[in-house]
Amino acid sequence: MLEELFAGSIADSEARQERMSLASLERLALSADSALDALHVLAPASQVKILAEVKRASPSRGDLSEIPDPAVLAQIYVDNGASAISVLTEERKFKGSLDDLRAVRAKVSVPLLRKDFIANEYQILEARAAGADIVLLIVAGLKQKELLRLKRFTEELGMTAFLETHDASELDRALEADGAMVGINARDLSTFETDRNLFGKLSHLIPPGVIKVAESAVRTADDVVHYRAAGADVVLVGEALVINDPAQMLRSFLSGH
């Protein structure tokens, strides 16, 4: 599944590159407003922070929510305490787009994550041109040289690289790459099964000063409390917000009950 998702995203980016050259896109990216300092906004604090996701569908659950106006949803997220917003831009399985990212950027002023299967510099330039402040790099889908190259390119554009892992060896690679924002995804992207306890099994390996993000398997406020107790600085939530009342869910996540 992960290989298929990467292949689809790469093919889609190549199709877009036929319509806009790398040079033209680079000019757009470099002329965009400077990226927000996501590491400052998401830095460890006394309260857990929520990275709220605009997510229409997923390979494991199919359609989740139509989300006719992602900017409206993003504003609800911000109004109810989200510290940053993740926008899924993968088109085939998640039904997202770069237009969603642009719409959200025009509406809110918190850091934005482009969540996609990023494998080349063109996609990173797209993220910056559309207003992203953070780019997801999935360790399982990249060789170490690719990971290092793409992380460096992301940071050269002023953005934060968010390195996603799922096991101890991937976590070692993320830390070897000097990741400042590291996620542990409870969902195995090979099987799409989840293990809420995975974060707690691995989080102690992440050194102080690195932003620790728990991803997936969040359905209720108890799950957020569980992740916080296991050391999460940030919890990324998508499905639970889009299939329920997002304002009510966010308030429950942040109040701890």
Image (cartoon, rainbow, N blue to C red):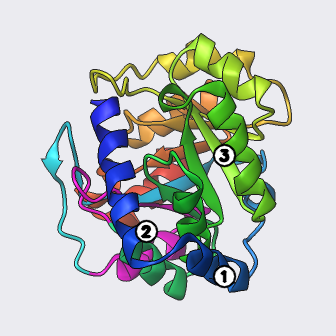
Helix, strand or loop status at disc 3: helix
The residue where tag 3 is placed is 150
- For marks 1 and 3, the one nearer the N-term is 1
Q: Which of 125 and 202 is in front in this view?
A: 125
- Drawn side of residue 162 relative to residue 72, left or right: right
> Which residue is depicted at the point 28% across and 64% down?
245
Location of residue 245 with respect to 169 vertically, above or below: below
Distance between the alpha carbons at the discs numbered 1 and 3:
19 Å
> Which residue is depicted at the point 48% across and 50% down?
253
Amino acid type shown at disc 2: Gln
Q: Is residue 97 magenta?
A: no
Point out the image quarter for the N terminus. Answer: top left
What mark, if any, has residue 125 been given in the picture? none
Q: Which of 88 and 242 is in front in this view?
A: 88
Helix, strand or loop status at disc 2: helix
Distance between the alpha carbons at the discs numbered 2 and 1:
14 Å
Q: Where is residue 202 in the image (x, y as percent from the top left)?
A: 62, 15
Instruction: Verify CB contact (< 8 Å) between mark 1 and mark 3.
Output: no
- Drawn side of residue 243 relative to residue 135, left or right: left
The residue where tag 2 is placed is 17
> Which residue is depicted at the point 52% across and 28% down?
226
- For marks 2 and 3, the one nearer the N-term is 2
Q: What stretch is highlighted in magenta?
A: 69-96
The residue where tag 1 is placed is 27
Location of residue 178 with respect to 71 vertically, above or below: above
Q: Where is residue 251 in the image (x, y as percent from the top left)?
A: 47, 60
Quadrant of the image occupied by residue 160: bottom right
